[in-house]
Amino acid sequence: MPVDVLSEIRIDRPRAEVAAYASDPENATSWYENIQTVEWKSPKPLTVGSQIAFVAHFLGRRLEYTYEVKEIVPGERFVMATSQGPFPMETSYSWADSPEGGTEMTLRNRGEPTGFSRLAAPLIAAAMRRANRKDLQKLKSLLETAESSPG
């Protein structure tokens, strides 16, 4: 059973600012509750093909995985994917201007669990949905309460 979790939020900050902050791997630990460490596996700056290793805790398990950046359209779209472990996954962000002058951000996680993870796919999807909502709310709070652009 594939997992496809789509979460959206409106952030009252300019799209370029939200996109730059959210797509910078160095900021991941500040707004993703489950991500504990980030390590560059390829030279900076961030480009298509860049590899970034993450350590996270999710559903009581420690997860280590390396994402490869698949697409970067500054201010519009950012896509990265991992083929490692029991749950190969693609994570994508997209940004659009909101009518009020802020940003509509979409976070999408999709993948095809294998092995035991396949049996737990509905549980995984529900937990991802909850985590994504919390993470996007934290990102919104960080960016909207900052006096100037964070980072």
Image (cartoon, grey):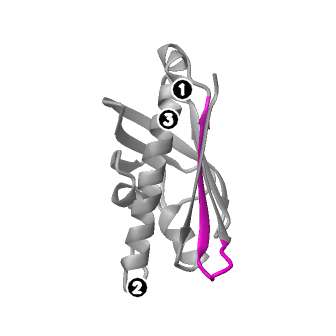
Q: Residue tagged by mark 2?
A: 148
User: What's the magenta bit mostly, secondary-structure-wise?
Assistant: strand
Q: Residues within 10 Å of mark 2 (few under 14, many from 20)?
A: few
Q: Amino acid at mark 2?
A: Ser
Q: CA distance from mark 2 to mark 3?
A: 34 Å
Q: Nearer the viewer, mark 2 or mark 3?
A: 3
Report whether 32 appears left or right of 98.
Answer: left
- Residue 46 in the magenta stretch? The answer is no
Q: Quadrant of the C terminus?
A: bottom left
Q: Is residue 32 visible?
A: yes
Pick the front one: 24 or 130: 130
Q: Residue under circle 3?
A: 126
- Of labels 1 and 2, earlier in sequence is 1
Q: Which residue occupies 35% across, 55% down? A: 29
Image coords of residue 71 (percent x, y): 67, 53
Label 1 and label 2: CA atoms lie apart by 40 Å
